[in-house]
Image: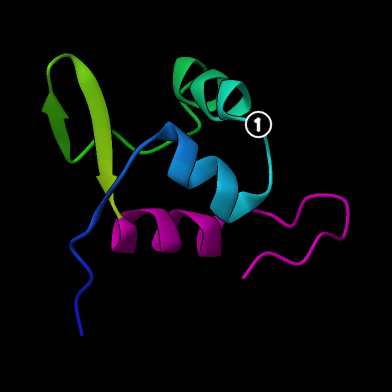
Amino acid sequence: MTDHRLWSYKDIAAHIRVQPDTVRSYRKHGLLPPPDHVEGGKPYWYADTVRAWVASRPRNRGRSLD
């Protein structure tokens, strides 16, 4: 089933267990996929986009990310 809920920086940060500023930095440095939607100048990503990105990332210091 496709998950098209839109996630903000805060939602992504909670999912990967980092601070929202870290996620902003990932985007600034091209490490985050382009947003699926922009509303009011704020970027949002589909949950499926974030999960696919997390699955493709190298593991960070042995951290297990669900």
43 horizontally vs 60: left or right: left
**Quadrant where the C terminus lies?**
bottom right
Neighbour tally class for label 1: few under 14, some 14-19, many 20 plus, Cα within 10 Å: some
In what element is the residue under mark 1?
loop
48 horizontally vs 32: left or right: left
The single residue placed furthest to the right in the displayed view is 61
**Quadrant where the N terminus lies?**
bottom left
Q: Where does residue 23 sit, x and y in percent of width and height?
A: 54, 30
Q: Quadrant of residue 22?
A: top right
Q: Where does residue 6 sit, x and y in percent of width and height?
A: 23, 49
Q: Residue at x 19, y 76 (%)?
A: 2
Q: Quadrant of residue 34?
A: top left
Q: Quadrant of residue 65?
A: bottom right
60 within the magenta span: yes
The single residue placed furthest to the bottom in the displayed view is 1
Q: Using the image, determine if residue 1 lies above or below residue 63.
A: below
2 within the magenta span: no
Q: Residue at x 68, y 48 (%)?
A: 17
Q: Residue at x 18, y 62 (%)?
A: 4
Way the structure is coloured = rainbow
Q: Give the number of marks.
A: 1
Residue wearing tag 1: 19
The amino acid marked with disc number 1 is Gln
65 horizontally vs 1: left or right: right
Magenta-highlighted residues: 47-66
